[in-house]
Image (tube, coloured by chain):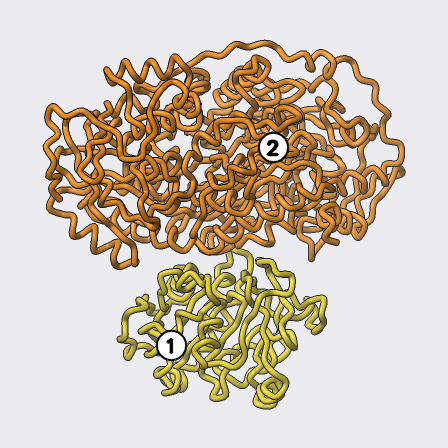
Amino acid sequence: MKINIDLTEKIPTSFPGDPEVNMDLAEAHQLSTDEYEQIIELLGRTPTYTELGIYSVMWSEHASYKNSIAQLKTLPRSGGRLLVDAGEENAGLVDIGDGLAVAFKIESHNHPSAVEPYQGAATGIGGILRDIFTMGARPIAALNSLRFGLPDDDRVRYLVDGVVRGIADYGNCFGVPTVAGEVVFEEAYTGNPLVNAMAVGLVEHDKVMSAVATGSGNPVIYVGARTGRDGIHGATFASEELSEKSEQRKSNVQVGDPFTEKLLLEATLELAETDAFIGIQDMGAAGLTCSSCEMAAKTGVGMILDLDQVPRREEKMSPYETMLSESQERMLLVAKRGREDEVFAIFKKWGLEAVEVGEVRDDGRLKIIQDGIFLADIPAVSLALGGGAPVYERERSRPAYLDKATEINSIKEPEDFEKTTIDLLSRPNIASKKWVYRQYDHMVRTNTRVLPGYGDAAVLRVPGTRKALSVTTDCNARYVYLDPQKGAAMAVAEAARNVACTGAIPIGVTNCLNFGNPYKPEVFWSFAEVIAGMGEACRALDTPVTGGNVSFYNENPKGAVYASPVIGMVGLAEDAEKTVGMAFPDDGLAIYLVGSDQVSWAGSEWQIMNQGDPRGELPELDLELEKRLQATIITGIENGFVKAAHDLAEGGLVVALAEMAVADKENPRGALLELEEPTPLNLFGEGPSRIIAAVDPEKLDEFEELAEKNDVPAEWIGTTGGIGIGFRNVFKVMLDDISDAYYDSLEKALGLK
Amino acid sequence: MKWGVVVFPGSNCDHDAYDALSRLLGQEVKYVWHQDRNIADLDAVLLPGGFSYGDYLRAGAIARFSDIMDEVVTFAHEGGTVIGICNGFQVLTEAGLLPGALIRNTSLRFICEDVPIRVEHTDCRFSASCSTGDVLKIPIAHNEGNYVLNDTELEDILAKGQVLFRYCSPGGEINDQNNPNGSLHSIAGVINESGNVLGMMPHPERRCDPILGSTDGRKIFDSVIKWVENNGKR
């Protein structure tokens, strides 16, 4: 392609129909006075309308991380098995041996899902999958973390239905198994659901694709779906609070096409096998704008784009609209000059358009033309994160609610243990999520060894090796509400513990930080506390943060959501065959309670059930003990001593035992417990660093020795078998009742049964 | 024997079928692209699960017009072994190689889970390694697996022994409770009148590797392999 317009000494102008650019228009684009002035200074003139649009999306919170990046940089973001530092590429990349790396990342799609749940959730999945295969990795698993208001509300039911269908339809058609996740119902998320999607992929080290542009004169090629007017200003929409007017934002929500995404995946991975290209970047938030300037900024080159070449599915799109469209299933790539035809042939084979739309230049500038009009001329680096995009520290102040929430709290303790067990198992947050994951194809690609519902984390074998990956998402936001720093550390610890309970060593974290408006000092205080707690836990557990996403402005007219730092954790097991789930696999196994004895009612399911809002002081979290506990369980599983393991989470000990009893629904198996003094608190209270292990009766000595060597308390508490969970002389609950409560309650709560 | 696994652009269980047949069952397998026409060298053709051409219209409705389906129809008419799994089953009904049609599940939701299916008879190349009444636990994963056909056709396929698999309880009973998608007569898999074409909604390729829990799916492939060994290609 030849761009036949001489731009020397030329200054960009407006496109016919463009509005006049001034401070008011900048404000309408959510740029501050300072930011607008900064743009004028950078350009040495007033920006054109196209340029203003470009700056507004690139400097939006969503794309620039301007209010969070300073904090994020304090997290452990390199070292260990990490092959690229956090934020360097589209997703984290961690070495797993055998010449393979795992690419993974979590991202939010909260605002779109709040106004258009089906497409919002679907395109959230689409976006995160592209982040993975843009790196040359084939997605092998999808996960999610979903938070809604209480399930008796009609709007919530509509959102749940739409979000689940959106995830199902997109992932199922694309052909990635959706293997794990969480679904949480809490008053605080009414009107502002959280929809976080995670994807995990595998790539050979030498096939990793990078989002770079180099080589002046190399062609810039647009591939995939055509560009329409959907999703314009999606990134800025994500950077404001939801309000009654948000319904009007429906047109900011993109529309997904999983079939085209599948074609794009196969074509991209076929391209990865060649050396005809330099780099590739997906067009996600801020579309063509973000992909072009990021690729250029990364290497300090420039890029010129001729928008007349961009395949469009709507007529008369202005350059502003074309640059800002967030139409899905598109990628931008830089090929080697002279090798374009190889690239075109691959995409054509998969029935996709591939069109040369521009060229790499060595002037460091992003230049845009359409209809022969020169429309934008911007230093590429001034747009990018880590380049010229603004960075802020926000004001912080400790929220007033904390004093009241954490004051000494007297609570009525459970008296009828049998009823309490059933009541807790029936809570929508504890009850089985089978109704949800049954709608997701969680087996396609035949790698899923521990299926959803069967373990604390999903386990996938790594094809072509003996290894397995264990993956989970986790966050108990009630704990974060009560103590943002400790609560965040507990979220990391729990996610790692879940992975350890399958027999895998936790190797890396991706995080999705869902918060309210960062300009509110209380929100920003919590954000900083969360980062501090997360950093501490990630360092202690040797699980660096490989990347992730920050989602601010999660507010509805009633206020901010609970600060919800969702942790996506990936673990590695050397021998897939040795990994375990949580279901009691046999009668006569010894049941051990391993780890900490610190429990409390604070933020527990019992406390919420009785008092509504989280109250109380969280128990102690000992990260060193946590690490030793996980090492003990992992070794116990690797050596075949431990046949099933389960983390004690919401609902405490009895709920955990009940879950292990009925996790294999068709083959339930009870247990007889012989706790010395079962108090309500140690039966139903909650605390970190606790695991139940079902141990081979022939290996009791070995297991106890292992625990002792690791300085981890391990108490024998009973034996598997029987038709119920029985605490000798105290109470018992029958398996049928457990199973009914556990498996039916979610559908009942959603009014479906 | 030599298998071909058809690859439509939206197939997504093609790798799984390939892996099960080649790595786990030691078969010679090749992928067959939807625009290819050369399948003369094959002993059996497998149409895998997925979303052939997106299936936004109706599952399999476009696939039946593909180049490869021309060849598969001829192959089947000549007596060649054809297995359609999930989307493959949908394509086979659209192409007229199997009776009936697959409409949306009665729940109007996608369903992915292990289900028990009962082997109705062993008098064909797809079930010879089983016993009549065997219960196999094999997962389903579909939105449109609700098998329908009219009364006359139902009587006809029952009379001709074309119903090969039915959804059942773990103990082998047929009842509504254990019919996951509303299929008429709890039908999970059917064969054509000559017994060389099988369509089934459950995914046997997902239950071939012991590391994934069960190997019930192998029985179906084993049956075919033995049959071809004894009888040749057709």
**SS of the residue at dot 2?**
helix
Locate the C terminus of chain A and report the quarter of the image it occupies: bottom right
Chain letter behind tag 2: A
Residue B44 is labelled as 1
**SS of the residue at dot 1?**
strand
Identity, as a three-letter code, of the amino acid under mark 2: Glu
Q: In which quarter of the view is residue A101 placed?
A: top left
Q: Residue B24, relative to residue A567: is it above or below?
A: below
Locate the N terminus of chain A and report the quarter of the image it occupies: top left
- Tag nearer the camera, 2 or 1: 2
The one nearer the camera, A20 or A109, is A20
Q: Is residue A497 left or right of residue A546?
A: right
Q: Residue at x 69, y 26 (%)?
A: A687
Residue A47, can we see it? yes
Query: Dot 1: few (<14), some (14–19), or many (≥20) neighbours within 10 Å?
Result: many
The one nearer the camera, B63 or A581, is B63
Residue A635, can we see it? no
The one nearer the camera, A379 or B168, is A379
Q: Which chain is yellow?
A: B
In percent of width and height, residue A197 lies at: 50, 39
Same chain letter for marks 2 and 1: no
In percent of width and height, residue A506 lies at: 49, 33
In percent of width and height, residue B52 lies at: 41, 64
Q: CA distance from mark 2 to mark 1?
A: 59 Å
Identity, as a three-letter code, of the amino acid under mark 1: Ala
Query: Dot 2: few (<14), some (14–19), or many (≥20) neighbours within 10 Å?
Result: few
Q: Residue A216, relative to residue A201: is it above or below?
A: above
Q: Which chain is orange?
A: A
Q: Is residue A559 left or right of residue A544?
A: right
Q: Which residue is mark 2?
A: A244
Q: In which quarter of the view is residue A680 placed?
A: top right
